[in-house]
Amino acid sequence: GVEELALLEQLLGLPKGSKYGVQGERKVPVLQTSNGPGLTGLTTIAAHLVKQAKKDQLLGSTAEEKAVVQQWLEYRVTRVDGGSSKEDSRIILK
């Protein structure tokens, strides 16, 4: 989670320096923001980074596209993270 978010930040061209952490047994990603409460969760933080980079088109432009993007982000968290091993994750993603 945290490594993926740092990579996303880099791919979006955002300056480095975001402070990421994890919370709980499942190591849920947390982003400490400078102007408010921290953000929790992979999909929430990913959407925040995309908006911060002003690349909202990556989140979809129509209601249907937005729903599909949200669906895939949720699938990533629930199915891929829910796998018991890297091999399980690889099979799920195929």
Image (cartoon, rainbow, N blue to C red):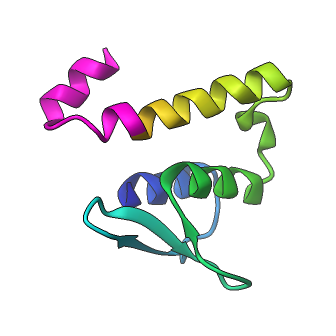
Per the image, is 87 magenta?
Answer: yes
Query: Outermost residue toward the top?
Result: 94
Q: Residue at x 31, y 41 (%)?
A: 81
Q: Residue at x 43, y 35 (%)?
A: 76
Quarter of the image for the N terminus: give it. bottom left
**36 versus 69 height, above or below:** below
Q: Number of numbered discs present?
A: 0
Q: Is residue 1 left or right of residue 51?
A: left
**30 versus 6 height, above or below:** below
Residue 33 place in picture, x, y as percent: 63, 79
Q: Residue at x 69, y 50 (%)?
A: 50
Main structural element of the magenta stretch: helix, strand or loop?
helix
Q: Is residue 82 left or right of residue 76?
A: left
Residue 94 place in picture, x, y as percent: 31, 14
Q: Is residue 55 left or right of residue 94?
A: right
Q: Residue at x 54, y 77 (%)?
A: 17
Image-quadrant location for residue 53: bottom right
Residue 23 place in picture, x, y as percent: 37, 71
Q: Is residue 52 left or right of residue 29?
A: right
Query: Outermost residue toward the right?
Result: 62
* Residues in magenta, as a range: 78-94
